[in-house]
Image: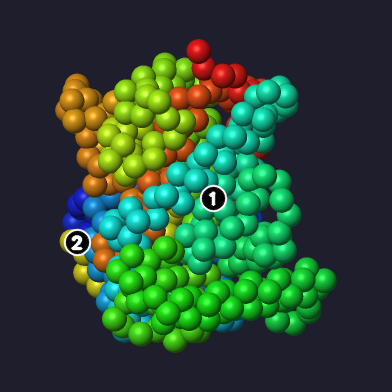
């Protein structure tokens, strides 16, 4: 039985009462299934946000037999994130699914294993290494620009989410191990087809109430096994090739050309299986989250032409005679593009929630959380509240500029946790931000964007990450 003893002096009005988990508010649910049906029917993050409006920042739900504490309280959530990995871990089911696939890396490892994997992964993706990868981003951004130009010339509707997934897939595979997929040009690739099979299945299995695939092997399960085997074999082959290159050219250790070389160059030696897990995790995270964030950027650009005009003005000042900013120095001067990206991340985080479990009894402020408590951190709620941001529900990139007053009268960026927080913040943060800022600036410099659908038709959907429902753009060249 999960228990939560809590003094309600920060969140609820009964300040002097001691409560068990069963005493916390809960939305109405089914006597047997609890809240499982509505949780599975709607986008999970929106269901939780609606329940938070009904029950407050701290409430309980039951998904079948499993009980969860849900917290939308920014200070409690921040403290929980700071106490990872010692006091809190990812929900065990996440690691169970990945380990079943042969993947154990910084994303799902815990305790001493996490410490072992964290340093080499963080070093391989630190800001200095990401800057060394910048020529790859420039090359892929130029290819994206060319592809957008082809749509503009023909007047064809552009499924922007699909195109951005191709872009991030090309970027991620090139940075991960130097593999040129070139899906942007429409080229079919067996590795890419296998990844498109593997990653959605990971989400499906994480969301499944029971592990049916261990009992009954469907055709899709068999296809998944074959695809996973191909991805694994390809990555292991690239690992072997990279080891040979490093042996022949030791200078690559100081100036690696991709993530794999950087990882193998770290002092702490990792086995090929451990390196495979790290590369697989980068592929899984890098393709989905960045593409979905960029799709939301394009949604806002299509609906805020004044923002496009300001981005274009900045781009013409920073790289006037270039299609793409080809130096990291130019990229660093794209301050308004950075502000646009930060604002989109605040309003539309691709990871609006995080599912954890307490490893031991923990006291946070007036709250005692027993060992084994399942916890869902609902982080987006605080990011769109006026208590933390001036006119919080408005799209206002200016709030992120140094001279963005008066919005800075109420501006608390520490509650934005799109990349997590505490010791286990996302190590791919620098790479994702560099990609997003670059694409935002380049597209706005060259094109005006118009949505074929009405903005109200575009909804938030949730699979492995939160993303917009499909929408199409008309592109026209800027004057």
Query: Callout 2: few (<14), some (14-19), or many (20+) C-alpha neighbours within 10 Å?
Result: few
Q: Please tell me which residue lies in front, 445 or 209.
A: 445
Residue identified by numbered label 1 = 168
Between residues 242 and 212, which one lies in front from this camera angle?
A: 242
**Residue 403 placement (x, y as % from top left):** 18, 25
Q: Can see residue 225?
A: yes
Residue lying farthest top? 479
Tell me which corner region of the image, top left, top right, bottom left or bottom right, holds residue 8: bottom left
Q: Residue at x 36, y 70 (%)?
A: 252
Q: Which residue is mark 2?
A: 366
Q: Position of residue 69 (x, y in %)?
A: 40, 62
Query: Which residue does the image show at 22% across and 34% down from the upper left?
Result: 411
Select label 2 or label 1 by which is in front: 1
Q: Does residue 221 lie above or below 291 as drawn?
A: below
Does residue 372 appear anywhere in the picture?
Answer: no
Q: Which residue appears farthest toward the right when viewing the image?
A: 219
Q: Nearer the viewer, residue 153 or 458?
A: 153
The residue located at (37%, 66%) in the rendering is 256
Q: Dot 1, how many residues are within 10 Å of its Cα: few (below 14), some (14-19), or many (20+)?
A: many
With 270 as the anchor, is 35 left or right in this view?
A: right
Quick one: label 2 or label 1, which is nearer the N terminus?
1
Taking 361 as reference, is 434 left or right?
A: right
State the image coordinates of residue 70 (x, y, percent, origin top left).
40, 57
- Residue displayed at 39% across by 75% down: 249
**C-alpha span from label 2 to label 1:** 44 Å
Q: Up-down: is 410 above or below 52? A: above
- Left or right position of 290 against 362: right
Q: Mark 2: which secondary structure?
A: loop
Callouts 2 and 1 close, C-beta under 8 Å: no
Q: Position of residue 208 (x, y in %)?
A: 64, 67
């Amino acid at each position: 039985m999960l228990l939560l003893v809590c003094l309600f002096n920060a969140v609820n009005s009964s300040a002097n009462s001691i409560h068990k988990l069963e005493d916390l508010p809960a939305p109405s649910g089914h006597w047997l299934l609890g809240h499982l049906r509505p949780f599975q029917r709607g986008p999970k993050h929106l269901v939780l946000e609606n329940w938070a409006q009904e029950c407050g920042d701290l409430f309980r739900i039951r998904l079948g037999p499993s009980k969860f504490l849900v917290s939308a309280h920014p200070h409690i959530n921040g403290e929980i994130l700071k106490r990872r990995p010692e006091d809190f871990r990812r929900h065990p089911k996440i690691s169970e699914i990945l380990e079943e696939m042969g993947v154990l890396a910084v994303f799902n490892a815990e305790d001493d294993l996490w410490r072992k994997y964290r340093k080499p992964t963080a070093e391989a993706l630190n800001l200095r290494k990401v800057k060394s990868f910048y020529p790859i981003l420039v090359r892929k951004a130029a290819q994206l620009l060319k592809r957008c130009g082809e749509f503009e010339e023909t007047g064809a509707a552009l499924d922007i989410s699909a195109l951005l997934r191709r872009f991030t897939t090309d970027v991620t595979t090139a940075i991960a191990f130097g593999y040129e997929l070139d899906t942007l040009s429409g080229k079919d690739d067996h590795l890419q087809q296998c990844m498109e099979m593997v990653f959605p299945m990971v989400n499906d299995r994480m969301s499944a109430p029971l592990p049916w695939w261990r009992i009954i092997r469907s055709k899709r399960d068999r296809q998944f096994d074959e695809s996973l085997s191909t991805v694994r074999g390809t990555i292991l082959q690239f690992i072997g090739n990279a080891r040979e290159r490093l042996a022949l050219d030791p200078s690559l250790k100081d100036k690696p050309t991709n993530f794999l070389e950087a990882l193998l160059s770290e002092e702490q030696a990792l086995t090929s299986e451990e390196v495979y897990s790290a590369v697989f995790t980068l592929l899984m995270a890098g393709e989905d989250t960045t593409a979905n964030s960029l799709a939301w950027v394009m949604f806002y650009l299509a609906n805020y032409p004044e923002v496009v005009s300001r981005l274009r003005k900045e781009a013409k000042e920073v790289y006037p005679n270039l299609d793409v900013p080809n130096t990291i120095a130019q990229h660093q001067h794209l301050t308004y593009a950075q502000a646009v990206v930060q604002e989109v991340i605040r309003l539309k985080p691709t990871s609006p929630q995080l599912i954890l479990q307490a490893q031991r009894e923990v006291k946070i402020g007036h709250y005692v959380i027993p060992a084994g408590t399942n916890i869902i951190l609902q982080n987006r709620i605080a990011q769109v509240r006026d208590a933390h941001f001036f006119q919080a529900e408005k799209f206002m990139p200016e709030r992120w500029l140094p001279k963005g007053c008066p919005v800075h009268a109420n501006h608390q960026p520490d509650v934005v946790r799109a990349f997590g927080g505490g010791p286990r913040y996302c190590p791919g943060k620098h790479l994702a931000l560099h990609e997003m800022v670059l694409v935002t600036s380049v597209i706005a410099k060259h094109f005006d964007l118009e949505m074929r659908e009405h903005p109200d038709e575009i909804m938030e959907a949730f699979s492995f990450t939160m993303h917009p429902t499909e929408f199409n753009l008309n592109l026209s060249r800027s004057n």
